[in-house]
Image: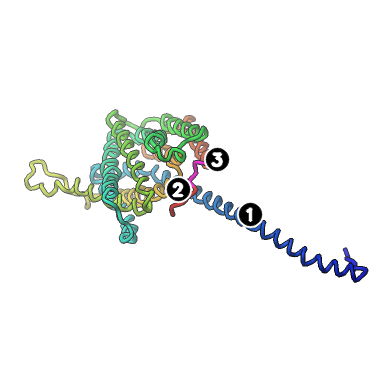
Amino acid sequence: MVLSEPSTPEAAARAADCRPESGRLWKRSQLRSAPVCDSKRGMEKIENHAGRIAFLGYGACFFASCLWGTGFYFGRLALNEMSVEHMVLYRFLFASLGMLPVALVHRRRFRLTAAEARLLLICAALGVPIQFLLQFHGLARTTVSHASLMVGAMPVLLAAAAALFAPGRANEERLGRLEWLALFGSTVGAALILLGGSRGPAAQGQPTLVGDLLVLASLATALVWILLSKKLMETHSPPVVTAYTILSGTLMLAVWILGPLLFNPWLHNKVAPLPIAHVSLTAWTALAISGLLCTATTTLLWNWGIHHVPASRAGVFLNIEPALGSLLGVKLLGEHLGPYAWAGGALILAAALALTTHGPSSAEPIVLLE
């Protein structure tokens, strides 16, 4: 379209007078709308950033659970050649190698009050020597399938404990109908997988009530450790808390296991020394994987994940551990996965997918500590 020139000088003057005013009106309109647009864009950036952090948090919990699922398998390989105490000690010596750089880098900035130091030592004792000695003494007296089945009860215990013992964070830890359904469905799925497998031959061991109860006791210990650790992570970096917890727990474990060796000259029943020369390469590899991946890496991933998402929602991923453990049990125990096992696997994957793809709710953390 071609605009015509004003026909008279008066019309031209009026047009000239109106253009600046029109420009000023347009500028004022833009200035009024600019703060609204900037605020909207800022909120969108915050929401997108929170969504990415939540996605990474769930992903960290997912990969941690996958690695945890291999723990019983590699633990069984090492138990074929050494005692429970020596296996757990070697595992955490390897884990300490992975945690030591984290502790050294942050040693000057990690300052604890007296109350926090006591809490850290309690977490270290619960999370390392008590939990793992109970767990692997239980595994030595039962089957991988039964031990994994006990672990399948962990999400329900974690969700219930988070609701009961974290009243100050009730809004964050509260579960909706979908979350409860996901937790219930994934737990049922884990039970179907493990109950659907056949027993291994008698030479490989049979499940016992004592073994199952020891594994269940280790889960109760792990539950307390998770909740107490999260309190420390509200004011301190999760990787640093994790590193010092494992290093302190490994030191406690070493004193507990190696301390009696000092009294060997005066003991009638000598304490067995650490096995070194006669340990096969397979066992050493299993121990290194158990320590560096199944312990150090998984604990860092899990603690970082639940630092950014509610622990009760992240709990659904703990069902991956018994599912993967049962799959590895097929190779270890010669079990067969029947239709119940396949149905259970589908339930677990569906529950995890429903939980992580559910739209954002008020329970999601918005203020990030890191």
SS assignment for the magenta stretch, majority: loop
Q: Position of residue 292 (x, y in %)?
A: 34, 52
Q: Residue 308's mark? A: 2
Quadrant in the rendering for residue 105: bottom left
Of tags 3 and 1, the one toward the viewer is: 1
- The amino acid type, in three-letter code, at marker 1 is Val
- The amino acid type, in three-letter code, at marker 3 is His
Residue range of the region highlighted in magenta in the rendering: 360-365
Q: Colour mode? A: rainbow
Quadrant in the rendering for residue 161: top left
Q: Position of residue 34 (x, y in %)?
A: 65, 58
Up/down of 285 relative to 202, above or below: below
Residue at disc 2, secondary structure: helix
Sort mark 3 into few (<14), some (14-19) or many (20+) by Cα contacts within 10 Å. few
Up/down of 206 relative to 66, above or below: above
Up/down of 216 relative to 24, above or below: above
Q: Residue 36's mark? A: 1
Q: Earlier in the sequence, mark 3 or mark 1?
A: 1
Query: Hey, which residue is sitting farthest top in the picture?
Result: 209
Distance from label 3 to label 1 (Cα)?
A: 29 Å
Of tags 1 and 2, the one toward the viewer is: 1
Q: Residue 333's mark? A: none
Up/down of 314 relative to 22, above or below: above
**Magenta stretch encompasses residue 364:** yes
Figure quadrant of the C terminus: bottom left
Point 31% across, 35% down: residue: 215
Of tags 3 and 2, the one toward the viewer is: 2
* Marks 3,2: beta carbons within 8 A: no
Residue at disc 3, secondary structure: loop
The residue labelled by disc 3 is: 358
